[in-house]
Image (spheres, grey):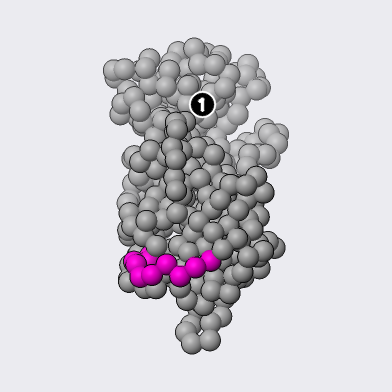
Amino acid sequence: MRRGHPASTRRPDVKLCWLDVRAVRSGLDAILEEAVHQRVDAVVAADPGVLRGLPPTVRKVLLAPTGGLPERLDGVDIVLLGPGEVLPEPLAAAHPELELGRYVEIVDKPTLDLACAAARSERWSVLEFRDPTKIPLEIVLAAASGATGSTVSAVADVAEARIVFGVLEHGSDGVLLAPRAVGDATALKAAATTRPGPLELVELEVVATEHAGMGERACVDTCSYLREDEGILVGSHSKGMILCVSETHPLPYMPTRPFRVNAGAIHSYTVAEHGRTSYLSELAAGSTVLAVDVKGQTRAVTVGRVKIETRPLLSIDAVAPDGQRVNLILQDDWHVRVLGPQGTVLNSTELQPGDRVLGYLPTADRHVGYPIDEFCLER
């Protein structure tokens, strides 16, 4: 039933966003306008007439009641059939360009088997799970491993979409959401951004270090294992930060804690998702921060705990190639480390003028963490 369609070339970190407008009774035009503006990947309807006005940037998907396919399918890109259904020969002959897929509602073991078969063999498989557990979805995704088709899972809301995107790490290829109001398409597209973009790191030259007295520092404990070349960006100013490494490297008197970054004094900035900054003092269980490696690759990680304790502090001043100065205040202890070029691990208390560390220089000023183009002087 694949009808010769090529394997998908879509990037695995770009998730499909489909909107199901079959139940929309009011505000349909506004919802469709938002869907087009947000460049959702597909709109699903039971009436081809709803789909005909959509531009080519949106796939037009028809999911008609069982046995109720209309005679005209012009303007439709994909027809979803139920288990065992076939496209009538006259329609198939009249529309050789149609892509076909299966819509399966999973309520028990037999329908789960049908879903697994569809995910393995069909160009498109749209699945609706009636039970709240994600175990059936995990089974389908495992069964479809290596298949060239795409699996789209129906979700109740954007919060569930985020969960579905992460099932078995790779998640479903996409989700199908029935919008309740204008704004749902925008929120869904935001949730589909599974990986933040890379950051351009620069080499900073250390120019001075000095003891900074006592103060509160924050250890950021994440819910993820961090690699040896990963950490989080921390700095006293929003326009300059240094890459602090996680505790993945051996220490003489304590075990490694590869989920932790001994990050800096509580006033410090760090980078969260979508380019926003947060103070270390603001982070708490459930917050997100960006884990950054020495190549600038990033991923969002969830904070599980922040430990704030009074410790001796060390101030590090560094300068960028363009002359911009960067400051970092962190715990004054040998085991607190930063990263240098090629992933060199540097003990903070051993840094000397002339040493090089990796940093990041955001270009925009900040207002409540959001980038903004305005005058702002930080000292």
Would you say 45 lies left or right of 241 here? left
Give the residue at x 54% y 53%: 326
**Where is residue 364 shown, x and y percent of the image?**
50, 37
Q: Is residue 177 left or right of residue 42?
A: left
Element carrying mark 1: loop
Q: Nearer the viewer, residue 228 or 4?
A: 228
Q: Which residues are magenta?
A: 209-220
Chief SS of the magenta region: strand
Residue 217 magenta-highlighted: yes
Residue 239, position as x, y percentages in the image: 51, 45
> Which residue is situated farthest in the bottom direction here?
253
Q: Is residue 103 visible?
A: no
- Residue sitting at x 47%, y 31%: 373
> Of 156 and 322, which appears nearest the observer?
322
Give the residue pinned by disc 1: 39
Q: How many marks?
A: 1
189 inside magenta stretch: no
Amino acid at pointer 1: Arg
Residue at 58% of width from left, 57% of height from top? 318
